Image (spheres, grey):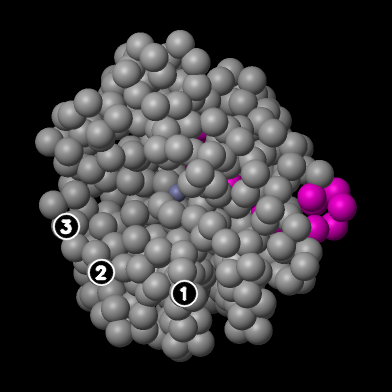
Amino acid sequence: MQERLIIRNARVVDPSCGDDDVRDVGVADGLIVPPSQAGGGACLDARGLALTPGLIDLHVHLRDPGQIDKEDIASGTRAAAAGGFTAVLAMPNTRPPMDNADALRATLARAQEFAAVRVLQAGALSIGLAGRELADFAALRAAGAAALTDDGRCVQSNALMLEALRRARALGLAVLDHCEDEGLAARGCVHPGELARSLGALPMAAAAEEAVVARDAVLAREAGWPVHIQHVSSGLSVDLVRWARSRGLPLTAEAAPHHICLTAEACLEHGTNAKMNPPLRGADDRRAILDGLQDGTITVIASDHAPHTAAEKDVAFQEAPSGIVGVEVALALCLGELYHSGRLPLLDFVGKFTTGPARVLGLPMGTLAAGAPADLTFIDVDREWVIDVRQFLSRSRNCPYHGRRCRGRAVATLVGGRWAWRDPEFDSRLRG
Ligand SMILES: [Zn+2]
């Protein structure tokens, strides 16, 4: 049930208004209210915890419908809640794909019934994500699509992508792009160099991504409509986004935790559990992504949560599916690399998970303003813990971080005034 709640002495970190100070927050009827209007409910002692707007993950594969041996709406969103997320944008490359209104409506109806957090569903740009014929964007929007992307694939025709941007603009729908020139990618799956040879896998040149990032900057200007670049992996891609933004071109970009934390060498240690698309790249690329997050070129961190079964991953590198699970560890990993390292103050860090994604979608989320839905994340930024994949709430375990020491994690999430997840130790803070 919905909580009436007074939260005492939280460190309130709200990038939507630049707030970072200790104060009380009230929750009543599913909304954030002044503490004086939340009387008669429970009292929460949040001393020592950061309280942020509910985190939003702009890039999640829930595998539902069609591949529920990997994940489903219930398991994926429970994992997201445990990771501190109160909303996820689900990618449309399900089976069948979300390229028509009926399929999308049915998925959102199941989410209404089974999801632990808000599920925003992306529709496909093209029928079957095949890049030949555009989906019916108006019908997708009417069915509840929150954005459009062919993630996993990439529309290869510049003319078709321009037409997609024009139609999306007319409907006010955000467009997200998995940037990959399929010719340049040439079936590659690993950063070029000695590593590719020792893994016996085909190299994927960074140019496959960079050429499409540059293309998208040009098309965004031509259409007068933004493109959001998904999971940047290369330093030149970051440079291109920085250049485009400095010219006033409407480009935004996200980075995934694995490109923030790891380089291609991780493939030697972790094998197919370090195989992703785009692949992990060099130390210079990783540093450029960190710099891009620090200087505001990259405004979003998104997990690219991509569950696969152990059997699917237990094959030769070239044959294995791409992706790793991420929603339960994204916040902790990035706290270490960006906040505890001193690269970003907590307020700017939290913005990558709240105001950043909310602006991409054009949705009034990611704020603790009075009257907003009570989507809240409680974070113990100093909690030390060790990642144990056996404890994941996700249905899958494909993850290269098992045994990694972390500092900081979400300890509770509230969605629309209802608890979506609470750490066992958190309950001792609740009274009444
Ligand atoms: Zn992708």
Pointer 2: what residue? 96
Left/right of residue 176 with respect to residue 111 in the rendered view: right
Q: Three-letter amino acid code at disc 1? A: Glu
Asked if residue 104 shows in the view, the reply is yes
Of pointers 2 and 3, the one earlier in the residue sequence = 3
Evaluate if marks 1 and 2 touch, with contact meaning CB atoms under 8 Å apart: no
Q: Is residue 37 magenta?
A: no
**Which residue is at 49% across, 15% downward?**
193
Q: Secondary structure at mark 3?
A: loop
Residue 209 got which mark? none
Q: Three-letter amino acid code at disc 2? A: Pro
Of pointers 1 and 2, the one earlier in the residue sequence = 2
**Which residue is at 16% across, 29% downward?**
314
Q: Nearer the viewer, mark 3 or mark 1?
A: 1
Pointer 1: what residue? 133
Asked if residue 381 shows in the view, the reply is no
Pointer 3: what residue? 68
Evaluate if marks 2 and 3 touch, with contact meaning CB atoms under 8 Å apart: no
Q: Residues within 10 Å of mark 3 (few under 14, many from 20)?
A: some
Q: Three-letter amino acid code at disc 3? A: Ile
Q: Quadrant of the N terminus?
A: bottom left
